Amino acid sequence: MSGRAPAATADDASTRTDRCGCCEEPVPTGVKRCPICGYRPAGHSPRLTLLWEVGAATLLLAAVVTFAVGVGGAVFDVPVGAFDQLAIVTPYMAGFSGFFTYYLHEKRRLTPTDDQVFE
């Protein structure tokens, strides 16, 4: 007895099932859409979700840069125009866009058998 587990085959991966989050029927774990009810938790258009995710990440980066320029200008007494006033609202903007970046990234990866936390 070698103590090693038998090698996994391609059939093993396709036969693993879990319950669908919508119809509660057993479905294979690797599918993106439930073959029984058509449930797709990643949304109707994964490309559109990716576009929103990239947009939220860009807004997050812009908020952090604006905050750094505004606070840096105020601390070092460098005239930066409206950036020092705009830096007041950027933490809120960064918080919202950071949340939506994370949410959309996780939602895009969901399968029908995943937990419904991001639903």
Image: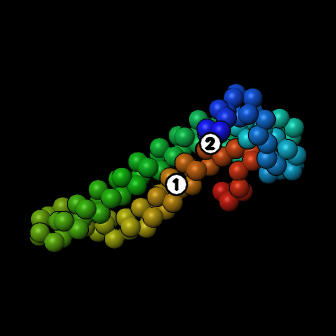
Q: Quadrant of the N terminus?
A: top right
Instruction: Find the distance from the CA under tag 2 to the CA under tag 1.
Output: 42 Å
Residue 26 in percent (x, y) is at 85, 44
> 77 or 21: which is nearer to us?
21
Identity of the amino acid at label 1? Tyr
Label 1: how many Cα within 10 Å (few below 14, some 14–19, many 20+) = few
Using residue 80 as the reference point, say whether residue 40 is left or right of it: right
Q: Residue at x 54, y 40 (%)?
A: 50
Residue 71 as seen in the image, left or right of residue 114: left
**Number of marks in the rendered image:** 2
User: Where the C terminus falls, by quadrant?
Assistant: bottom right
Whether residue 79 is visible: yes
Q: Earlier in the sequence, mark 2 or mark 1?
A: 2
What residue does disc 2 label?
A: 3
Along the horizontal axis of the image, is 106 left or right of 30? left
x, y percent for residue 24: 86, 50
Q: What residue do we see at 67% from left, 35% from top?
A: 6
Residue annotated with mark 1: 102
Circle number at residue 43:
none
Question: Residue at the front extreme?
Answer: 1
Query: In the displayed structure, would residue 37 be above or below residue 61?
Result: above
Residue at the limit of the structure toward the top, as seen here: 10
**Residue 71 coordinates in the image, percent (x, y):** 23, 68
Q: Secondary structure at mark 1?
A: helix
Name the foreground residue: 112 vs 41: 112
- Quarter of the view holding residue 4: top right
Instruction: Kindly identify the residue that appears in the image at 53 percent across and 45 percent down.
Output: 52
Percent coordinates x, y for residue 13 in the rendering: 71, 34
Q: Amino acid at mark 2?
A: Gly
Front one among 38 and 51: 38
Q: Is residue 83 visible?
A: no
